[in-house]
């Protein structure tokens, strides 16, 4: 696309209008950057023009630098030059903001002399989410307007902020600079109102060139050291927020030119980092995950039924209600139903307390809830999600009942975590309606939903479920039927390796420490204690897949045999002392270690020394190896989908990209050597041959 097409010039009386039209999100590609410079020059040279409005076509103001250009050599004009050119303009420039003004897009707006916006627009500097810091003046101009403290929060959190939310906080610099000079009603005509606003300034002789870069940063009474320490702790291994905080601190007393120089250097260094590559990869694979080659049109779904009001069912129901669906909750009896409704209300109250929703929104959502024990009330539902306990025979009975009460087009989804959905579908006359929708706990919070394609599932049912997941503001990944689908099958393999390391002499707390230091949200053994060691144990004991033989999980079995089921019994791999913070903090318990040591001795397993590196390596190899097998078997559409599953379902550190991204970092040759070594120690049943050439398909 050439310059003329991405940025155009027009005029309205004495106002020049620069319009960016570069769908989908007006990213600052080379042609847009060049178009802005050329357009500005043109309008500056036009003697009839007194002010310039910068606006965008399509669905949003500029959403940032063009991420697609990040892997390529930089091309002139660079963004810092463009923003400085805007600020240096000899005529006032007014940014007209709607949609999202993010990253480089917000930096462009900050360089303008006025900013006007629709009330529902969002702004922000989300660069840290891509492992970067703002690279075109964001760390310099923002603190000059909102002060050091607010700027530090905005830059290091990467959050998107509502325009009205910021305006309400009345953030204005002591020099009279403000983030927004005018805010117009949501959905109103932005350009028309901007032109009226600018004409008012021209007619009243109030038009000024307010250069943010010429001001100083206000950091009065701000405790930088405390703030940077807090940010470093919260970053949990992520580099970008810490670099951003230090840049803000180091440059606070500098002039804009020197400050931007340091900012740019740090931006360019981070752009080359593995963390940024991982985070950019994560951004792109999430967009791809929800795509299929199905041509079918999704069904309209507004009315949803959820069977089961336990933790999972009530979480799923909450997610649907929060997204505006009409929801019928079914339970077996009134007492269970009341508990389910109470759980849903508690979830909403938590959101109310945290400010995520207001009372009116909560009331509206809860008005859409019908709670009943009468299955016939599912007659209007277009989708029913079953979330009862994991018993195949009971689920089969339930689906037979659903077939009778639901209408013929209704999609019947099971939330099973590992049961055979084909066996469930086979009991009814319309198996094409049966799919899996595997939510992760807590379902009202966790983003991932595995949409499971059983042998006879129709494409319409699947594509409709995926569209519903998008409406829930969650991420769907299409998977096939196997024990545990993609996520739990890999999680089982991961858990199996952890269990093996325990028997070989790795300590409980050493394993958890190694994995959390590496970046996992929780240690695998603390997770087992939290969810209940018996849950996995019972599931493994009840299913027929030899590779998940409960015999591999001897340490967990020993805990169960000794009634050490985890937090719920006050002891599991750890001890939970009731005197200690309500028993919420895991304490190392020598009894658990003794039990595992005794089991290892009984099995004749020799104890060896472990270090963190070996623990992480073996855990990762287990994931990589199982992931490759899953892909080879066609359980996932693409290798990158596995990473989406792990990032959103299992607390895999986003800045490490996912198990498959890690495989690329470790390298095929290294993985082959490591697998060979483990195979020679433990045998090819535990470490089967995998096709490492599949990794070549992963596009980074
Ligand atoms: N560059 C290039 N393409 C982008 C893009 C960007 N900055 N942001 C979004 N896109 C693309 C997406 O890849 C997607 O492409 P596809 O249709 O081919 O899949 C398309 O635009 C639409 O994006 P979404 O599906 O995400 O649409 P949504 O409406 O859900 O969200 C959004 C829109 C809020 C803008 C979201 O896309 C987003 O958060 N984008 C990233 C914004 C960002 O991180 N900006 C900072 C970039 S770094 C930077 O600016 C550095 C600077 O400081 C120098």
Image (cartoon, helix red, strand yellow):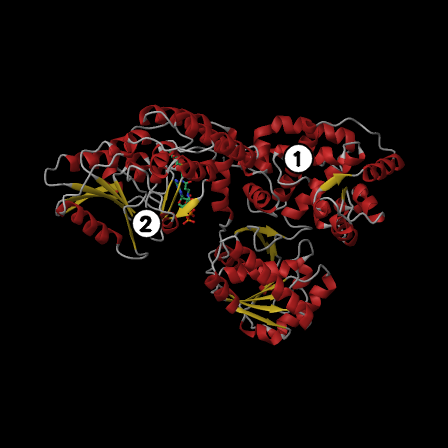
- Which of 480/662 is in front? 662
The answer to whether 188 appears left or right of 686 in the picture is left
Task: Count the labels in the image.
Answer: 2
Kindly identify which residue carries mark 1.
Answer: 515
Please state if 70 lies on the left or on the right of 456 as rendered.
left
Asked if residue 453 lies left or right of residue 94, the reply is right
Image quadrant holding the N terminus, namely top left
Closest to the observer, 113 or 144: 144
Image quarter for ligand 1 equals: top left
Between the C-alphas of marks 2 and 1, the distance is: 43 Å
* Picture coordinates of residue 112, whole percent (x, y): 27, 38
Report crowding for label 2: few under 14, some 14 to 19, many 20 or more residues within 10 A (C-alpha).
many
The location of residue 684, given as percent across then percent down, is 75, 35
* Residue 190 sits above or below residue 345 on the image: above
Q: Which numbered disc flags the more N-terminal residue, 2 or 1?
A: 2
- Answer yes or no: is residue 689 visible: no
Secondary structure found at label 1: helix
Q: Report the residue that reaches farthest toward the left.
A: 47
Can residue 59 be seen here? The reply is yes
Judge whether 100 appears above or below 598 on screen.
below
Q: Residue at x 69, y 29 (%)?
A: 612
Q: Residue furthest right?
A: 602
Q: Nearer the viewer, residue 430 or 484?
A: 484
Which residue position holds label 2? 98
In the figure, residue 668 lies in which quadrant? top right
């Amino acid at each position: 696309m050439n310059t003329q097409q991405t940025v155009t010039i027009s005029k309205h009386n004495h106002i020049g209008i620069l319009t960016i039209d570069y769908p989908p999100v007006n990213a600052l590609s080379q042609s847009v950057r060049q178009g802005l410079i050329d357009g500005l020059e043109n309008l500056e040279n036009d003697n009839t023009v007194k002010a310039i409005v910068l606006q965008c076509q399509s669905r949003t103001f500029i959403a940032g630098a063009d991420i697609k250009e990040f892997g390529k050599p930089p091309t002139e004009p660079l963004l810092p030059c463009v923003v400085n050119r805007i600020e240096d303009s000899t005529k006032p420039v007014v940014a007209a903001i709607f949609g999202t003004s993010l990253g480089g897009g917000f930096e462009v707006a900050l360089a303008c002399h006025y900013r006007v916006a629709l009330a529902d627009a969002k702004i922000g500097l989300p660069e840290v989410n891509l492992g970067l810091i703002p690279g075109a003046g964001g760390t310099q101009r923002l603190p000059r307007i909102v002060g050091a403290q607010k700027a530090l929060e905005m830059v290091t959190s990467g959050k998107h902020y509502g325009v009205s939310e910021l305006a309400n906080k009345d953030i204005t610099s002591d020099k009279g600079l403000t983030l927004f000079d005018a805010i117009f009603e949501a959905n109103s005509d932005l350009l028309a109102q901007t032109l009226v606003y600018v004409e008012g300034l021209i007619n009243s002789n109030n038009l000024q060139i307010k250069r943010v870069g010429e001001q100083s940063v206000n950091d009065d009474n701000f405790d930088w050291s405390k703030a940077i320490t807090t940010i470093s702790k919260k970053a949990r291994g992520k580099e970008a927020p810490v670099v951003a905080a230090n840049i803000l601190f180091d440059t606070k007393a500098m002039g804009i030119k020197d400050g931007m120089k340091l900012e740019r250097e740090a931006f360019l260094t981070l752009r080359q980092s593995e963390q940024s590559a991982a985070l950019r990869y994560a951004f792109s694979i999430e967009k791809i995950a929800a795509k299929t080659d199905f041509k079918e049109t999704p069904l309209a779904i507004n009315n949803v039924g959820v069977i089961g009001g336990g933790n999972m069912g009530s979480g799923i129901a909450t997610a649907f209600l929060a997204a505006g669906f009409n929801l019928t909750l079914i339970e077996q009896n009134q007492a269970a139903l009341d508990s389910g409704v109470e759980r849903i209300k508690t979830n909403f109250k938590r959101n109310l307390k945290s400010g995520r929703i207001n009372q009116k929104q909560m009331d509206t959502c809860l008005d859409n809830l019908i709670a009943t024990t009468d299955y016939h009330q599912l007659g209007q539902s277009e989708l029913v999600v079953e979330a009862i306990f994991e018993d195949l025979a009971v689920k089969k009975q339930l689906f037979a009942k659903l077939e009778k009460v639901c209408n013929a087009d209704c999609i019947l989804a099971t939330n099973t975590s590992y049961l055979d959905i084909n066996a469930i579908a086979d009991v009814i006359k319309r198996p094409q309606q049966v799919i899996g929708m595997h939510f992760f706990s807590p379902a009202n919070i966790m983003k991932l939903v595995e949409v499971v394609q059983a042998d006879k599932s129709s494409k319409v049912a699947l594509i409709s479920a995926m569209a519903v997941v998008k409406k829930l503001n969650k991420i769907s990944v299409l998977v096939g039927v196997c024990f545990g689908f993609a996520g739990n099958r890999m999680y089982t393999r991961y858990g199996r390796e952890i269990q093996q390391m325990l028997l070989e002499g790795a300590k409980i707390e050493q394993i958890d420490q190694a994995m959390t230091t590496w970046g996992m949200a929780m240690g695998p053994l603390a997770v087992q204690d939290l969810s209940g060691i018996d849950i996995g144990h019972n599931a493994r004991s009840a299913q027929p897949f030899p590779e998940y033989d409960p015999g591999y999980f001897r340490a967990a079995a020993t805990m169960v045999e000794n009634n050490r089921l985890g937090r719920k019994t006050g002891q599991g791999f750890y001890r939970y002392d009731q005197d200690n913070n309500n028993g919420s903090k895991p304490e190392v318990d020598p009894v658990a270690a003794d039990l595992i040591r005794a089991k290892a001795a009984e099995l004749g397993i020799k104890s060896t020394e472990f270090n963190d590196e070996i623990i992480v390596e073996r855990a990762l190899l287990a994931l990589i190896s199982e992931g490759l097998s899953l892909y080879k078997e066609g359980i996932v559409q693409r290798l990158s989908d596995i990473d989406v599953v792990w990032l959103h379902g299992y607390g895999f550190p986003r800045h490490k990209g996912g198990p498959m991204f890690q495989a690329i970092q470790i390298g095929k040759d290294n993985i082959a050597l490591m697998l060979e070594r483990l195979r020679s120690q433990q045998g090819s049943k535990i470490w089967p041959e995998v096709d490492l050439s599949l990794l070549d398909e992963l596009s980074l």
